[in-house]
């Protein structure tokens, strides 16, 4: 009995009302979707060859140089997290607005969420395709950042069927904030800098 409690903290948190039931499944689906969009964009750019890669490099204008990155600072971590948290948390507000109650509103929300995810994954995937593995050292935070994006998506996918309680919504918001602060810390500390 005790071993089950210790080995399954997600069930404990879900039972306490801090995280919505079914979050693990929805998060895995959303996380897979985010990576499929990112990697398929990278594959398209890479397979299209040099002309598309050159165009993408021109549009993105990335400078893969440690000298261009500032030294790690706490303010930079806070600024990055503050920038990313609204981008990944806004789907939680859809339930507060009651969007899940109306069929048309749900479909519109699905479309807006898809556009948001594509807008975030497309440039990253295009950069991966254009710059190749040399980009990887500059995006060590990406798996964690995408995890936060997937938690926001997963929250909406759950709300489409069952509205979140206030406790579940706050728990999910707190989880996303922690994940985004971890991603920002990784980005600032692990990215090559001057």
Image (cartoon, grey):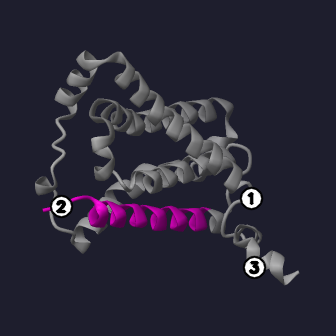
Residue 174 percent location from the top left of the image: 52, 68
177 in the magenta segment: yes
Give me the disc on residue 165. none
Residue that appears at 31% across and 18% down: 49
Q: Nearer the viewer, residue 124 or 190?
A: 190
Whole-number angstrom distance, CA of label 3 to CA of label 2 = 40 Å
Q: Is residue 182 left or right of residue 154?
A: left
Find the residue positioned furthest to the front.
Answer: 133
Say which label, 3 or 1, has the lower sequence index.
3
Give me the disc on residue 6. 3
Say which label, 3 or 2, has the lower sequence index.
3
Q: In which quarter of the image is residue 85?
A: bottom left
Residue matched to label 1 = 21
**Front position among marks 3 and 1:** 3
Residue 116 lies, with reference to residue 21, above or below; the image says above
Give me the disc on residue 193. 2
Mark 2, Cα crowd under 10 Å, few <14 / some 14-19 / many 20+, is some
Magenta-highlighted residues: 169-194
Residue that appears at 25% across and 73% down: 74
Q: Which type of secondary structure does the marked residue at label 2 adopt?
A: loop
């Amino acid at each position: 009995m005790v071993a089950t409690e210790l080995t399954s903290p997600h069930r404990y948190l879900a039972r306490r009302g801090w995280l919505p039931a079914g979050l693990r499944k929805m998060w895995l689906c959303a996380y897979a979707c985010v990576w499929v969009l990112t990697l398929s964009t990278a594959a398209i750019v890479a397979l299209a060859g040099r002309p598309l890669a050159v165009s993408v490099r021109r549009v993105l204008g990335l400078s893969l140089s440690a000298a261009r990155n500032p030294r790690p600072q706490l303010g930079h971590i806070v600024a990055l997290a503050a920038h990313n948290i609204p981008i990944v948390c806004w789907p939680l507000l859809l339930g507060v607005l009651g969007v899940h109650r109306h069929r048309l509103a749900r479909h519109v929300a699905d479309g807006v969420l898809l556009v948001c995810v594509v807008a975030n994954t497309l440039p990253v995937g295009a950069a991966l395709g254009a710059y190749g593995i040399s980009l990887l050292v500059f995006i060590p935070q990406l798996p964690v950042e995408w995890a936060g994006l997937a938690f926001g998506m997963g929250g909406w996918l759950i709300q489409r069927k069952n509205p979140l309680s206030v406790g579940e919504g706050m728990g999910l918001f707190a989880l996303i904030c922690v994940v985004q602060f971890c991603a920002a810390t990784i980005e600032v500390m692990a990215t090559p800098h001057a």
